[in-house]
Amino acid sequence: MEKELFDELFKKFKIVPKAYSLYMQAFTHVSYSTQHKNNINYERLEFLGDAVLDKLIANFLYQEYPSMSSGELSTTHSLMTKGKTLTIAADRLQFKDLIIFGGTMRSKADISDRILEDVFEAFIGAVFLDQGEAKVWTILKQTVIHYYLTNMLSKDQDYKTLLNSYFLQHRDIDFKYNSIYNRIKREYVVELIIDNHKSSIGRGLKIKDAENAAAKIIYMRYKKANKIK
């Protein structure tokens, strides 16, 4: 049954796997690898897929929308690569039926949106290694890019872009985002440093979400103080 489901996925994107094990790894949750005392799970492929996704979507926007400002490019890029978007893709591709899990995860009902998001990125990473960038591009055109072009994606406020625009207008302000990954809570923690002072802390399942959360605190603070109109 499992092989049939993978075959359907390969057929959809016209993939002839060279390394089948990569795809198995892309759909293996850490609960399964922990139970079987090995480190073969999707986490490393997720890291790679995230980077590949970011690059290809950034290039798409830059090439296709020459009139977009840098702020608009950043906001649209965030919209297309955020967790909700990737979860939509994974859900439509029925990835929940392919995920291999174990340990404390007892059924498909335990598979969260976060896991679906991670697995989509891991799948992109596996395809990149096995088939190359061109095949990843084909998949993105049928999923993430298609969703954007057909107005399927809901827009969230991008506080990081709004705040960064304010900082760029006031070049005397020095700012940076410092991030760490909390492996116990499986979340990112981002500190927004302004003029060498820790000004806010944001948390999120993705580093972009944590940065946006940290930026939102300062943006709302500045808004309340009428520093931002």
Image (cartoon, rainbow, N blue to C red):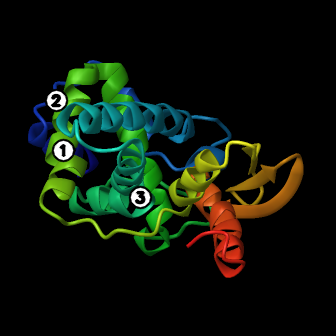
Say left or right for 176 vs 8: right
Q: Looking at the rendering, which quadrant does residue 206 occupy?
A: bottom right
Which mark sits nearer the N-terminus, 1 or 2? 1
- According to the picture, the residue beneath numbered tag 2 turns out to be 15
Q: Are marks 3 and 2 in contact (CB under 8 Å)?
A: no
Q: Quadrant of the C terminus?
A: bottom right
Which mark sits nearer the N-terminus, 3 or 2? 2
Residue at 50% across / 56% down in the picture? 101
Q: Looking at the rendering, which quadrant does residue 188 occupy?
A: bottom right
In this orientation, does residue 137 appear?
Answer: yes
The residue closer to the viewer here, 17 or 187, is 187
Say left or right for 172 vs 92: right
Label annotation for residue 116: 3
Q: Are marks 1 and 2 in contact (CB under 8 Å)?
A: yes
Residue at 36% across / 39% down in the picture? 123
Residue at 65% across / 61% down in the picture? 215
The residue closer to the viewer here, 177 or 136, is 177
Residue at 87% across / 55% down in the picture? 198
Q: Position of residue 29 (x, y in %)?
A: 52, 50
Q: In this rendering, is residue 211 above or below 39?
A: below
Point out the frontmost of discs 3 and 1.
3
The residue closer to the viewer here, 133 or 119, is 133
The amino acid type, in three-letter code, at marker 3 is: Leu
Query: How far separated are the C-alphas under marks 3 and 2?
Result: 21 Å
The amino acid type, in three-letter code, at marker 2 is: Ile
Q: Position of residue 62 (x, y in %)?
A: 28, 33
- Mark 3, Cα crowd under 10 Å, few <14 / some 14-19 / many 20+, is many
Identify the secondary structure beneath mark 2. loop
- According to the picture, the residue beneath numbered tag 1 turns out to be 9
- Mark 2, Cα crowd under 10 Å, few <14 / some 14-19 / many 20+, is some
